[in-house]
Amino acid sequence: MGKKKKINKLRSLKPEIAKSRAYTVIVPILDKEQAERIVQIALDLACSRNGRVVLVGMVLVSVEKSLTTGTTQAQASRAILESLRTRFEGQPIYIKPRIRVVHRPWQSLTKVIAKERANLVILPWRPEGTEPLFAMELDQLLGHLDCHVVVVSGIVPEKLRHILMPIRGSQETPLILEVALSLAKAADAGITMLYATEEDPSPTSRRTYKELARISMKHPRIKQELRVADNALSAILDRIDRHDLVIMGASEAAPGRGSQAIGQIPRQLQLKDIESFIVVRTHQPPPLGEMGKWDKQEPLPATQTSVVVDKWFAENTFNSEEFKDLERLVAMKEAQNVTISLGLPTLNEEKTIGKIIKTVQNWLMTKIPLLDEIVLIDSGSTDYTVEIARDYGIPVYQHSDILPQYDSFRGKGEALWKSLHVLNGDLIAWIDTDIVNIHPRFVYGILGPLLRHNTIQYVKGFYRRPLKVDGSLQAGGGGRVTELVARPLFNLFYPELSGIVQPLAGEYAGQRAVLERLPFYIGYGVETGLLLNLVECCGISSIAQVDLRRRIHRNQTLGALSRMAFAIIQVFIDHLERRQKVELLSEVNRTMKIIRYATDSYTLEEHPISDQRRPPIITIPEYRARHGITDWDETEIDWQEDYDPEEGLMI
């Protein structure tokens, strides 16, 4: 069984919302203008059948542009969905957590309809030229959605008193009547039923009209029945000033017949700037000749990878501002019954550690109980880092004292791996401790996506990193190893990760149940290794990134950055060796010649830099005992063949 299959069960760590078999109405949310009113219409229609409403955030990007250009719109779309969640709190609404950023919305929408077993979808309709993707493709869409469709043109008034319902006795008449009655009941409005008889109706249409005429005599919402010898468009225009809303059926043309699908009368109403009307279309399976053409209408871009990465970037890139409502984060945490730990890895950080602990404690523990614990994991500081932390009352561990029977090695990755043993939370967050401009967003920003989206297992932070040169800060000058080494290598060998803005950033969080099943490199390569292992076992959709805005920290020397780059390159080669089953490096290649400059000479110093791997910590018996793990499946993790139990390292 492959790694992806072995770890698929991890994606069910959070309980999914049960999908009811009740009547389901889908609403794609594209912008704020119509959203609230359309959602209210959807609720009126769903509640009349004791059903529910499913909201899907969608961002439409022109085919000429990269999907990544929809990133900012996706963040705005999440904000709209959150406002709708607040506005309709307590109503039977489920918001799909993932925003769809797409060139063509219909494929994504059809998948949602199938997954949610939808009965009805409500779409906005803009005049042609104002929103081309909807205006030009609406006809095509109507023939391919596997459910009934309600199209809303304009903004339906909040206070409805009089609804005009033109009918022709077509197969759409029952749906027209259902929509009209549901909205009339919700608004306490009356309905005028209009039947234009200029064209000779078919026998079926006459029978349908007679049945409706009989019903109208008894139904309290149908206040008036008009039969006029006029064409339907003229009859509607003559009476529209006395009604708040028109509800009509689409054309009876077969699906896939281009401009006939929406109907000529609705098009004429839109051209005449009628403020608001609703068009309904009963689901009709497409003719056999039309089936299978949907996926062939647009040529694929140059590479499948670019499509995946662009889509991931737009949909899984967040902004920390999206999660600044801390009370809402706490409510999500409590609803999921999870605990959260923050680990602070340190080595001589006395200048910054006090402010970091004070800020995070004050905002995220005292004022708002988002964090359950803050723990400092030190790597042998010789300054006052440990004393300062203890003064603030947080637990302090030397990483060399954690699981000492498995030896101890120098390196940040070693501290993080061992911290999993002493941290207790279901969600684990780590932040670097040299941050000068600390703010609570460095913590809640990386936790937000984990709490909001049950498909996300790991979150990376990114930010603008000013570089201090000659005493002044140059905006965007930091991250030199990232741009010169890490990102080029990701693009070359793991292009699915090429959308990660700052793969080496020290602020990240993840699900314990995933982190405990990953190997950790003990040194500079820990961040790179986690990303490579995550994408191989869980896929790119399990990873998200968050804009933490601006970060000021201590910049390292060029020599230190050179050693970091050397270790990171080794991590890539190590993964390539394992993936390709080849040996690219020998031990002699794991030492680096460092050039030392003296006043009148140069010398070479040889430094061994080998970023070894710790095994998944769940393989350690002491870890399983401390965290009460008794039923783990060893076959989930491919680690035994290259593990040295005496040293606790993967070889």
Image (tube, rainbow, N blue to C red):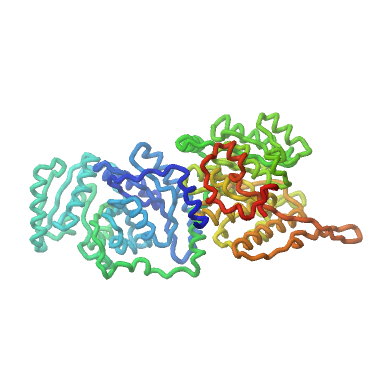
Residue at horizontal 49%, vertical 70%? 302
- Judge left or right: residue 565 versus residue 248: right
Residue at horizontal 30%, vertical 58%? 145
Give residue 282's position: percent from left, percent from top: 23, 56
- Judge left or right: residue 499 versus residue 172: right
- The answer to which of 494 and 83 lies nearer the viewer is 494
- Judge left or right: residue 409 versus residue 55: right
Q: In this view, does 599 lie above or below 219?
A: below
Residue 352 visible within the image = no
Q: In this view, does 340 lie above or below 65?
A: above
Q: Is residue 552 above or below residue 373?
A: below
Give residue 530's position: percent from left, percent from top: 60, 52
Q: Where does the C terminus fall, quadrant-wise?
A: bottom right
- The answer to which of 4 and 556 lies nearer the viewer is 4
- The answer to which of 604 and 185 lies nearer the viewer is 604
Please identify the residue farthest to the right as the structure is shown: 600
- Judge left or right: residue 61 versus residue 406: left
